[in-house]
Amino acid sequence: AQSVTQLGSHVSVSEGALVLLRCNYSSSVPPYLFWYVQYPNQGLQLLLKYTSAATLVKGINGFEAEFKKSETSFHLTKPSAHMSDAAEYFCAVSARGSYIPTFGRGTSLIVHP
Amino acid sequence: ETGVTQSPTHLIKTRGQQVTLRCSSQSGHNTVSWYQQALGQGPQFIFQYYREEENGRGNFPPRFSGLQFPNYSSELNVNALELDDSALYLCASSYRTGETSEQYFGPGTRLTVT
């Protein structure tokens, strides 16, 4: 079974600083990996996904993530945080041939002025 | 293109009652999934429907049931409500292609059980 672990339930950064949200996955075979963002009182929106093409995946709103098989990681980064990035971020994994992702517990990103 | 919509937005029910939540999939999508998101948690998979057939189920009791209609709209029914059923219920639709498919989420229905 696949699972993801998001390290840190809260991450606090200053506006303009680097954003790093950590995600480690557990899977017996290379999986599909996703990052979603959830703004208050809204559903989830896909930021980016890894499907075994390039290991560095670029998403919306300036976010990117790098798939590292040796570290079983798929960390999300953004060079410069904006106030509008404050939200809940979820990492998710699904097995190849499965259409059902498993979500992590989420990381709340707090951006200080 | 119309996105995924859910109704109602909020709902308050009493323990033991039954509730029906509704979802309208994004146009052209043939798969719908339902998730339960408790406060401070990630979404937990309840079940998925593909072309009106249940295609997978998470660790939820039988009192959680669903339907997908020919127009690909969907319902989630919960019987004998318990206090722990209080959560945000998310619907996500997708179109199956290849080995995976991107899910598009609705805004959710906030259910409170008292």
Image (tube, rainbow, N blue to C red):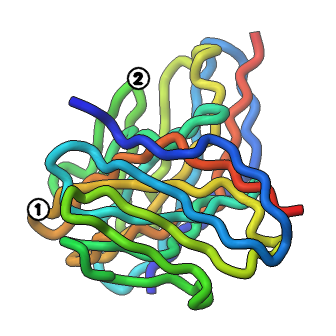
Secondary structure at badge 1 equals loop
x and y percentages locating residue B51 in the rendered image: 19, 71
Residue A87 visible in the current orientation:
yes
State which chain disc 1 sits on: B
Q: Residue furthest top?
A: A113
x and y percentages locating residue A91 in the rendered image: 50, 55
Residue that appears at 45% across and 79% down: A2
Quadrant of the rendered image containing residue B63 = bottom right
- The kind of residue on which mark 2 rests is Asn
**Same-subunit check for callouts 1 and 2:** no
Please state, as top left, top right, bottom left or bottom right, where the N terminus of chain A lies in the image.
Answer: bottom left
**Residue B99 to residue A80: above or below:** below
Q: Residue furthest left?
A: B98
Residue A51 visible in the current orientation:
no
Residue that appears at 35% across and 67% down: A69
**Could you say which is closer to the camera, residue A24 or residue B66?**
B66
**Could you say which is closer to the camera, residue A71 or residue B8?**
B8
Residue under label 2, please give it.
Answer: A61
**Could you say which is closer to the camera, residue B10 or residue A15?**
B10
Secondary structure at badge 2 equals helix
Q: Is label 1 or label 2 in front? A: 1
Distance in Å between CA atoms under marks 1 and 2: 26 Å
Residue under label 1, please give it.
Answer: B97
Quadrant of the rendered image containing residue A52 = bottom left
